[in-house]
Image: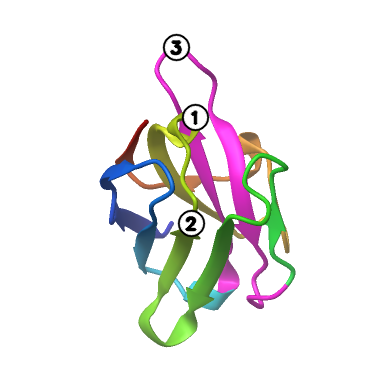
Amino acid sequence: QVQLVESGGGLVQAGGSLRLSCAASGRTFSSYAMAWFRQAPGKEREFVAAISRSGDSPYYSDSVKGRFTISRDVAINTMYLQMNNLKPEDTAAYFCAATTKFWLATRPLDFDSWGQGTQVTVSS
C-alpha cells in the first residue's frame, strides 16, 4: 500500500484560499487513482474531488465545483487540492485517499489507502 501524508490545512476567512498537499510514498504513484474527502464533526465522510491514474479526468462534487481544483505532480508523488472562495460550510477534516482498483473512483469504500487528515477551518 501507499503511505499518504496531508498538509496545508489551517484557519482562513470566508472568501480566502488554501492549497492542500498529499505526499505519497511506496508504490508507483501513477498506479493510483486518488481523491480528496472531507468529514465534519457528526457527519459522514463526504467526497470532494477525484483524479484518475493518468492525471486527467478530474471530477468534483457539486458543492465545490468551480471553486476547488484537484491536480497531481507525478514527478514528486504529490496530489493537490487548490481551494478558492472558501465558505464556512467547507470546514472539515480533509483526507486524501488512493486506490489501484479503479481508473477513477469517488466512493470511500473504493479506496484502501488513507492519510491522517488535515483540518480546514473557515471563519465567517
Alpha carbons under labels 2 and 3: distance apart: 25 Å
Q: Residue at x 47, y 62 (%)?
A: 82
Q: Which mark is residue 42?
A: 3
Indicate the secondary structure of the residue bearing disc 2. loop
Q: Residue at x 65, y 43 (%)?
A: 110
x then y, percent, for residue 106:
68, 46
As drawn, is 94 to the left or to the right of 58?
A: left
> Can you tell which of label 2 and label 3 is closer to the viewer?
2
Q: Which mark is residue 84?
A: 2
Image quadrant where residue 62 sits: top right
x then y, percent, for residue 29:
48, 74
Indicate the secondary structure of the residue bearing disc 3. loop
N-terminal-most mark, 2 or 3: 3
**Dot 1 amino acid type:** Glu
The residue identified by callout 1 is: 89
50 within the magenta span: yes
Alpha carbons under labels 2 and 1: distance apart: 13 Å
Q: Which residues are magenta?
A: 31-56
Quick one: quadrant of the N terminus? bottom left
Quick one: quadrant of the C terminus? top left
**Label 3 crowd (10 A; few <14 / some 14-19 / many >=20):** few
**Label 2 crowd (10 A; few <14 / some 14-19 / many >=20):** some
**Label 1 crowd (10 A; few <14 / some 14-19 / many >=20):** few
Q: Is residue 117 visible?
A: no
As drawn, 49 above or below 25: above
**Dot 3 amino acid type:** Gly
x then y, percent, for residue 19:
37, 61
- For this orientation, the residue located farthest to the top is 42
55 within the magenta span: yes
Q: Residue at x 40, y 32 (%)?
A: 92
